[in-house]
Amino acid sequence: MELGQTADASALENIRAIQMTANARGDNALCVFASILEGLTLLKASKDGNLEKVQACIAQVAKFQFDDSVHIMQLDILTLLLDLASSINHSSLELTCQKLKMLQDRMDQCGDWHNVKSDFFIPIRKQPSTGHTISSDTAGIVRSGGDAPVDYLVMSFMTKMELASLIFTFTGLVNMHKSTAHGRRTAEFWQEGVRVLDGWDNTTAGIPYGPSTSLQDAMSQREWRLEAQTYLTVLLGLYAASHCQWDLVRQAVQKLEVLMTPSVQGILRLLTLYLSGVYCQAIGELHEAMKVFQKPDFDLDRRGTGIKAAHRELAMLAGLNRLCIMQHPSERNDPETLDLIDRLYPLCANHHNVDLRTAWHNVMAAIVTEPPQQLNHQKQHIQAAMAGSKSTNNVLGAAVTLAIMRSRLFENVIGEQALKSAMAAAKQAQRSGNVLWQSVADGMLAQSYEVQGHHQQAAHEWDKATREAQDALPGA
């Protein structure tokens, strides 16, 4: 599994072989663990039907729910983590929140789990042939059960502190599309996750880990914590970008430069690269941003079932960024725009991630092409984007869509419907907490007031939009 890509197929074969052997021996806990591992492996790749297979793995685990031997705390938590991870971006927010609550409740029941204990035991039935091979020398892999009818496989896991940081990460992701008040909490959850990891060495100083930990295990745990810090820093940077907090984005980019080591896995490098491109685009360095998003790392034509879903999705997002940048006169390239649209369409139009689909429809509704899009096509993109934002409670996505709708359908239009459209866009932008889109929407509302002859209201909205633009844009 660590090799990734094409090695995943071999990993799945071995995991299923373990499952069959464990089932034949009556080792139900090991059978459950193999099902969880299979589900985690399936999550990595972008192959169609994998999510249904993940749910089948979870259903397989549920078959043993009345067997006391499988109710091992770490197995319970792994099952809940797998179920939650497969639900984010694929299930309703209400259902995902329910699964998060189940995970948090199970974590709260782990009072007797030592903060720095990183292994757990899976019972396996004793075999007559193993009586002389299991000893203190094998205790790091197989531990004797003494007079009990079982021995124990020793499995390396994460510590309670590390798991807490992971749950903070998931909690932030699940809460991200809630109202502005909840949205602010998203960053707080991630910051708390970072604090747990940053303070690891000081917090655990002088605490015995129990049985001696091998150097290799200690290094692996340290590497995991470094990668978790990297991921949380990327999330905080992207979240700050969605709120026009460019100093925080710059700080995240600088911190990531320090965290990057040769051992950091590729997807984290790609996320870091994407964030740097977002920052360049935000501060107006459009040519630099294009150079970042055109790197081979974001190649849309990578094929094969071993390509991780996240790699492909980041390549798609980078393509959407390029479409936006090429709207600027300094980077205008109509043939490349049309070519990129043709390449993105089959990937984005029916993608299972609703927020990614929403971003695609928003970009397609907003951009100007040569030859121009038909107005009917733009309306279809607007409708699809609005439906997507509504289904995931994506307040910012809806704000962008309403602003695009006002611009595309009601520019210089006199009448109550045009004014209502502008007011709806301004109200939704205010809810989003994104000051740049607030400026855009308030500017359009001012223009709508002018067209209607409401000059006093127009002047008020122009002043407001100008202040917001100055707050949103570095050096404005």
Image (cartoon, rainbow, N blue to C red):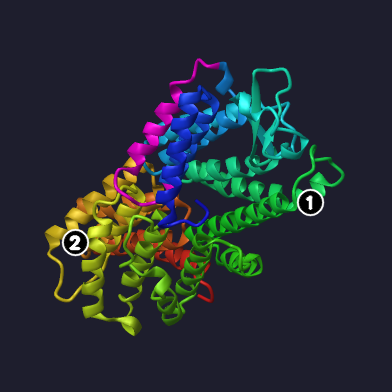
| Tag 1: amino acid | Asp
- Between disc 2 and disc 1, whose residue precedes? 1
Using the image as rendered, state which of residue 228 and residue 306 is in the foreground: 306
**In the visual, does 372 lie left or right of 253?**
left
Q: Assess disc 1: are there few (<14), some (14-19) or many (≥20) residues with their C-alpha within 10 Å of its C-alpha.
A: few
Q: Assess disc 2: are there few (<14), some (14-19) or many (≥20) residues with their C-alpha within 10 Å of its C-alpha.
A: some
Q: Residue at x 51, y 59 (%)?
A: 238
Q: Which residue is mark 1?
A: 201
Mark toward the viewer: 2 or 1: 1
Residue 219, position as x, y percentages in the image: 70, 55
**In the visual, does 357 lie left or right of 26?**
left
- The part of the image, by quadrant, that contains residue 405 is bottom left
The answer to the question of whether label 2 and label 1 lie on touching residues, with beta carbons closer than 8 A, is no
Residue 325 appears in the rendering: yes
Q: Main secondary structure of the magenta part?
A: helix
Residue 444, position as x, y percentages in the image: 32, 62
Q: Residue furthest right?
A: 206
Real-space Cα distance between discs 2 and 1?
62 Å
**In the visual, does 148 lie left or right of 64?**
right
Q: Residue at x 53, y 27 (%)?
A: 102
Q: Residue at x 22, y 64 (%)?
A: 411
Image disc number at residue 413: 2
- The part of the image, by quadrant, that contains residue 329 is bottom left
Residue 414 appears in the rendering: no
Magenta residues span 43-67
Residue 322, position as x, y percentages in the image: 35, 72
| Tag 2: amino acid | Val
Secondary element under disc 1, as helix, strand or loop, is: helix
- 45 magenta-colored: yes
- The part of the image, by quadrant, that contains residue 169 is top right
Residue 242, position as x, y percentages in the image: 47, 58
